[in-house]
Image (spheres, rainbow, N blue to C red):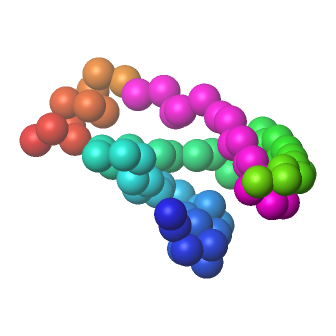
């Protein structure tokens, strides 16, 4: 489980972000403008009590890289 302030810090800001998922880290490079969706679910269960879930989906295409750029980065 992640602290909600830490999660907000990962989403907020600009430029590249490193996000841990499971046992690996993914480098993300979102553009200035991205598509998003927000979903909210509320459930009430007799045994488990009430539960609230918020899902945030961020979607973008990664920037295109050229062979010259990748070769220069490798050096």
Q: Residue at x 71, y 42 (%)?
A: 57
Q: Is residue 59 magenta?
A: yes
Q: Is residue 60 magenta?
A: yes
**Residue 27, image x, y percentages:** 39, 47
Asked whether residue 71 appears in the rendered view, the answer is: yes
Residue furthest out toward the bottom: 5
**Image quarter hosting the C terminus:** top left
Residue furthest out toward the front: 47
Q: Is residue 42 left or right of residue 12?
A: right
Residue furthest out toward the top: 67
- Residue 5 vertical placement versus 66 (above, below): below
Which span of residues is magenta-colored? Answer: 48-65
Q: Please, what is the dominant secondary structure of the magenta stretch?
A: strand
Q: Is residue 23 left or right of residue 15?
A: left
- Residue 74 vertical placement versus 1 (above, below): above
Q: Residue at x 62, y 72 (%)?
A: 4
**Residue 22, image x, y percentages:** 37, 46
- Residue 48 vertical placement versus 35 (above, below): below
Q: Which residue is drawn at 22% across and 41% down?
A: 73
**Residue 18, image x, y percentages:** 41, 55
Q: Residue at x 85, y 53 (%)?
A: 46
């Amino acid at each position: 489980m992640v602290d909600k302030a830490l999660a907000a810090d990962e989403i907020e800001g600009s430029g590249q972000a490193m996000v841990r998922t499971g046992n690996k880290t993914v480098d993300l490079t979102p553009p200035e403008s991205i598509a998003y969706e927000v979903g909210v679910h509320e459930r009430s269960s007799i045994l488990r009590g009430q539960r609230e879930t918020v899902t945030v989906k961020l979607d973008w295409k990664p920037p295109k890289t050229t062979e010259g750029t990748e070769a220069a980065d490798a050096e």
